[in-house]
Amino acid sequence: MTPITLSSNPGSTFTYTNESATLHLKTPDTKSENWSLHASSVWISAVFLGDHIHLLDLDRYHHLPKTRVLELGAGAGLPGILIAKTRDDVQVVLSDYPDEELIDALNQNVAANVSNGSVHVVPYDWTTGDTTPFRALSPDGFDVIIAADTLWNVDLHGAFLQSLESLLRRDTDGPSTPSINLVAGLHTGRWTIQAFLRAVEDRRRFLLHRVVEIRANSGKGTTLEERNWQVEREGEDESGRRAWVVSITIGWK
């Protein structure tokens, strides 16, 4: 069965390698009262996003002094740190729940892998709605927001969408329109993803530009096995679902 986590031993080191960089990441832990966050793992969606950074099309922001990238629910910070390590035209902010142990691991991962000061860590609870710490780093919002496996809790979809609305740069003109790029595994079922897609449509602030399923073990690079999103697939069992991730791209209306 396709694994949904590649490291679930808090405090252990997870090594990620592609043709451009090698990262050594501490698998985070949380205080016991925050175990329900499921933050003490490196999830397959984060690895998939690292393998396929090209899906973000960051080159279209080349005319900006710096492309401002925010990763929400960053966990170990794999895709955000990889972007900062392999590009000199970005400013990256990594954010996760304000649990002391979780944020400490995230800061350690930044220090161990990126030395040019292009990455900041911001503790943030989606349910508070207080985006003040982000404004100090990017007053106009972010050009690109990414998140891996942050849709599993239906009760937080509203707070997550409100955070996205508050933090995405609002410019809708020109070649560098801001975008939200989410990758989610299907291990919690298809209806969880569908609930989020409906929530996006109901709020009427965003457009769903792209919703596709991609085989999770697609190799690094540009060759992907894709198919259109379907909320139901006849005969699919858990093993079949776990073999795929959903890639969602969202922008302003």
Image: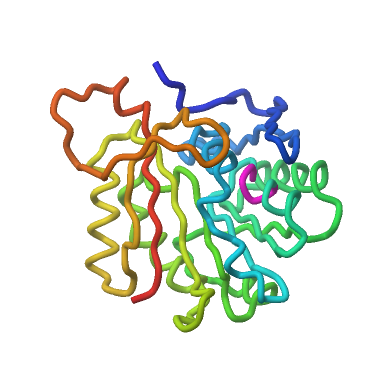
Most foreground residue, 116 or 13:
116
Position of 203 relative to 231 (above/below): below
Q: Position of residue 248 (x, y in %)?
A: 38, 53
Q: Is residue 223 above or below residue 154?
A: above
Residue at left offset 37%, top offset 54%:
156
Depth order, front residue of 72/96: 72
Residue 124 shown in magenta: no
Side of 19 relative to 127 (left or right)? right
Q: Report the front residue among 214 and 152.
A: 214
Residue 78 in the magenta stretch? The answer is yes
Residue range highlighted in magenta: 77-81
Considering the image in quadrants, where does the N terminus appear?
top left
Foreground of the two, 253 or 227: 227
Residue at the far right: name it.
Answer: 115
Q: How is the image coloured?
A: rainbow
Q: Is residue 54 above or below residue 201?
A: above
Quadrant of res 65: bottom right
Q: Which residue occupies 21% across, 25% down?
A: 236
- Give the residue at the far top of this rendering: 1
Q: Which residue is at the far front? A: 223
> Residue 192: which quarter of the image?
top left
Name the residue at 32% across, 62% down.
208
Residue 243 at x, y percent in the picture:
37, 26
Q: Is residue 84 left or right of residue 4?
A: right
Q: From the image, which quarter does the C terminus lie in?
A: bottom left
Q: Is residue 103 above or below residue 13?
A: below
Which secondary structure type mostly characterizes the magenta part of the structure? helix
Q: Which residue is found at the position 30% from the left and 28% from the top?
A: 241
Query: Percent position (x, y) of residue 211?
Result: 32, 52
